[in-house]
Amino acid sequence: MEIGSLKIIPMRNLTLLMIISSCLLLFACKKDNKTERFKFLTGHVWTTESLLANGADASGPGGILEQFKGDAKFNEDGTGYFGIFTGTWRFNIDETELVIVTDTQLLPIITDIVELNALSLVVTTLYPNPIDQAHPINIRMTFKAK
């Protein structure tokens, strides 16, 4: 429709234009929902500094943590590798625990995150003691960013 030299856009075209503009704006402004802890964990390859069981080094030959020695990588898609193991990982709801699931372990490994920043990852957990089931093994794993 035209009034004098002004062209009037029909209402249905204006509505369609508004919908398309809104969609483009929403997609252009999509927010990054990744938390700082998620970015710290997935942004590095982590290498072991210490692997302790009941306060003693357990990373040497025959140690219960020997197979965790080396690098760990937590991919953004929830997969990763942890020493010689491959599997999946996830945070709990408030990102204070790290859960690792691998086919080679019967149960998920649920760890408490003691420290997680751009340089350091420290987790602790209790592991069943096959010799004395009343007293689980206190595990502490410390990693540094590569």
Image (tube, helix red, strand yellow):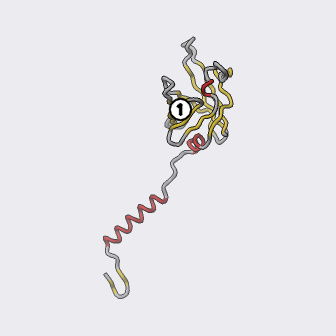
Q: Quadrant of residue 128?
A: top right
The residue that mark 1 highlights is 86
Q: Would you place residue 11 above or below residue 45 in this image? A: below
**Nearest to the observer: residue 145 or residue 14:** 145
Image quarter (top left, top right, bottom left or bottom right) of the C terminus: top right
Q: Please state the horizontal and vertical placement of residue 112, each as a whole percent of the image.
A: 57, 30
Locate residue 28 relative to residue 83 in the image: left or right. Answer: left
**Nearest to the observer: residue 64 or residue 97:** 64
Which residue appears farthest toward the top when viewing the image? 131
Tell me the residue at 54%/36% (across/down).
80
Q: Please state the horizontal and vertical placement of residue 130, each as a whole percent of the image.
A: 55, 14
Q: Quadrant of residue 132?
A: top right
Q: Would you place residue 146 above or below residue 50 in this image? A: below
Q: Callout 1: few (<14), some (14-19), or many (20+) C-alpha neighbours within 10 Å?
A: some
Tell me the residue at 49%/37% (across/down).
93
Residue type (three-letter) at the residue carrying disc 1? Thr
Q: Please state the horizontal and vertical placement of residue 136, each as a whole percent of the image.
A: 57, 17
Q: Would you place residue 134 above or below residue 107 in this image? A: above
Locate residue 113 relative to residue 24 in the image: left or right. Answer: right
Q: Please state the horizontal and vertical placement of residue 91, each as a whole percent of the image.
A: 52, 36
Judging from the image, what secondary structure is the residue with disc 1 in?
strand
